[in-house]
Image (cartoon, helix red, strand yellow):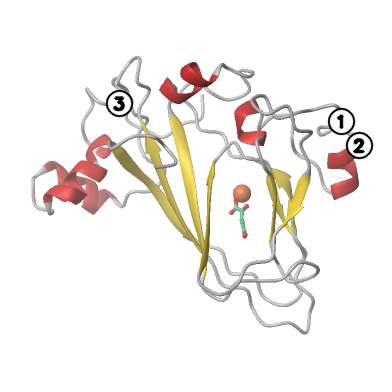
Amino acid sequence: MCLGSDNIYFDHNQLLTRPGGYPGSSWHSHPIGAGRDNCGVADLTEYRAQPNTNLTICYPEGFETGKDGGLKIVKGSHLFRDPANCRFTTDDEMEQQWLVNRVHPVTGVPLQIERLSLPPGSIVCCLSHAVHGVAPKAAERKTRWCTLFCYKKQDDLTGFVQPPRAVPPVWALKAKQGELPDILQKLLRHSFDRKLTGGRTEHDET
Ligand SMILES: O=C(O)CCC(=O)C(=O)O
Ligand SMILES: [Fe+2]
């Protein structure tokens, strides 16, 4: 639903365990490659046709605001596709630099930091150009658990999908040889189908 496409492709899965004493993660967003990073704001029809990457971030035990290792995020920031310029260490720097005079391109609402507080069993879905960071986790608090599932869609104009970041080679081989269930073969097709990747063989972010 977030990618607006039935043709989605696996990119990577990652555990994001934040134990007591974790210092927090600075502000950032994630490049997607395919020439779609740091390329400015597009109108919505164009944006939807562009390639994109979605992060589904699962927090089985949730977290609170404050020093609990919680996610901080700026709603609407994905539309700026600006991973090169949104990197800051502190919330103050973010507020005094990237956020200054920046409004949501569709609603016109000024962009602002949201410090989430989520109950157990929550997931966050955001596009990978969404600007986010993680609050520190106080030393005495219990580990914050998390796993991330990252999927992407093709560029609707070219039909190309970038090769994945982290599909184990044995899975790519099995997918190529038709030894996996159909759904997995479909999700992993860009790990072996060079027509689909426009000839690319490796994940890269250009
Ligand atoms: O730990 C989190 O909640 C998010 C982590 C994150 O931003 C990342 O892995 O890129
Ligand atoms: Fe991140």
Quadrant housing residue 96 = top right
- Mark 1 Cβ and ligand 2 under 8 Å apart: no
In the rendering, at what x and y percent does residue 201 appear? 32, 30
Taking depth in this image into account, of 144 and 191 the one nearest to the observer is 144
Mark sitting on residue 100: 1
Quadrant housing residue 176 = top left
Mark sitting on residue 197: 3
Q: Nearer the viewer, mark 1 or mark 3?
A: 1
Please tell me which residue is depicted at 32% across the width and 41% down the height of the picture.
Answer: 9
In the rendering, at what x and y percent does residue 137 appear? 75, 71
Mark sitting on residue 194: none
Q: Residues within 10 Å of mark 1 (few under 14, many from 20)?
A: few
In the rendering, at what x and y percent does residue 125 appear? 51, 50
In the rendering, at what x and y percent does residue 178 appear? 8, 46
State if disc 2 and disc 1 touch (CB < 8 Å).
yes
Q: CA distance from mark 1 to mark 2?
A: 6 Å
Q: Secondary structure at mark 1?
A: loop
Tag 1: amino acid: Val
Whichever of callouts 3 and 2 sits on the residue coming sooner in the sequence is 2
State if disc 2 and disc 3 touch (CB < 8 Å).
no
Tag 3: amino acid: Thr
**With 44 as the anchor, is 10 left or right in this view?**
left
Please tell me which residue is depicted at 63% across the width and 19% down the height of the picture.
Answer: 41
What residue is disc 2 on? 96
Ligand 1 picture quarter: bottom right
Please tell me which residue is depicted at 55% across the width and 40% down the height of the picture.
Answer: 128
